[in-house]
Amino acid sequence: MTEEEEKDGEVPEEHSLESLGKLPGVGSTTLSKLKDAGYTTLQAVAVVTPEELSVDAGVPITTAQKIISAARQALNITFKTALELKQERMNTRKITTSSKNLDELLGGGIETRMLTEVFGEYGSGKTQICHQLSVNVQLPEDKGGLRGKAVYIDTEGTFRWERIEAMAKGLGLDPDEIMSNIYWIRAINSNHQMEVVGKLFEFVNEEYIRLVIVDSVTSHFRAEYPGRENLAARQQKLNKHLHQLVRLAEVYNIAVVITNQVMSRPDVFYGDPTQAVGGHVMYHAPGVRVQLKRSRGNKRIARIVDAPHLPEGETVFAITEWGIRDPD
């Protein structure tokens, strides 16, 4: 990694938490509490609610409100013109999927500062895409990567180092070096899953993480909250987790990709009877939603279900011995 790239992964000095200590009302004791709670940048403080900060840092809610307000003021979070927003969004970067067809469908690849959901039936290619992205994020930018590392949160035991090795070889890369830059963790339940993501707010900056994957995001929630009587509790907790992931993507300008299971709706007589698990909570949180379907042989169909900046459409890609590719 070059010196310029290392700087790109660092939090600017004026955005570090120490700068918050210079603001009125934030003393050394409060600053220490914020650090212990995992708030290490102004961005991390600015995106939480006063209630969350109060609980996490153990400070009165009035103090939390003042801290958040000071952080937002320091970051100049205020009204912006559409032109200013365009210039800011131009700083987002993209990770190639190794399929030109799929990249074109996604507007150039998987975007940073964005939560991307990939859902589909078993064997549709969700985990294969996640494995490929974990390799590709390490590529130089001129080859569709970000020269960064990946975090893979595995909730179903689907991660396979053998596929990472094959995909690395398919790109002419050193498999051991590639695998050493992918941090894997098995989330054992929904609480652990959320705890892991909470710790990433500090970890991603320490290790130059540019991609976070949760495969799959709804598995534990679905298993731990069965039945209609638990639906409200499940949806509230899942909603909090999704917003946690959205903040992570926005605060650190990284790509966050989640996979999701599907279920069949017997009451649907026309069109596709399958839909993503999670209900309306899942409809609103991700910035891009992609549905995968099986086709003949090793071919898969990808369809944009929802993306405010992309047109609806679909394309075909293939899952080969060496990873995601365009079909022959």
Image: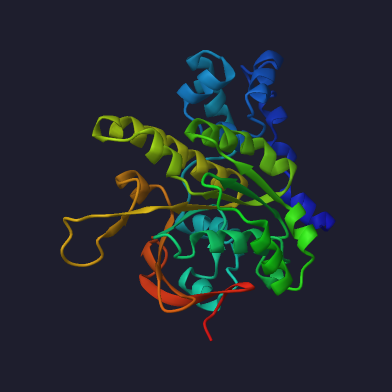
Way the structure is coloured: rainbow
Quick check: 305 above or below 52? below
Residue plotted at (18% across, 59% down): 268
Determine whether, in the image, residue 297 is placed left or right of residue 181.
left
**Image quadrant of residue 18?**
top right
**Image quadrant of residue 87?**
bottom right
Say if residue 11 shows up in the picture. Answer: no
Residue with the most extreme bottom position: 328
Say if residue 296 shows up in the picture. Answer: yes
Residue plotted at (50% across, 38% down): 244
Determine whether, in the image, residue 239 is placed left or right of residue 177.
left
Please name whichever residue, 113 or 150, is drawn nearer the observer in this view of the structure.
150
**Residue 257 at x, y = what percent?**
52, 54
**Residue 275 at x, y = what percent?**
30, 56
Quick check: 48 above or below 86? above
Please name whichever residue, 47 or 148, is drawn nearer the observer in this view of the structure.
148
**Image quadrant of residue 26?**
top right
Determine whether, in the image, residue 319 is placed left or right of residue 175.
left
Quick check: 152 above or below 203? below
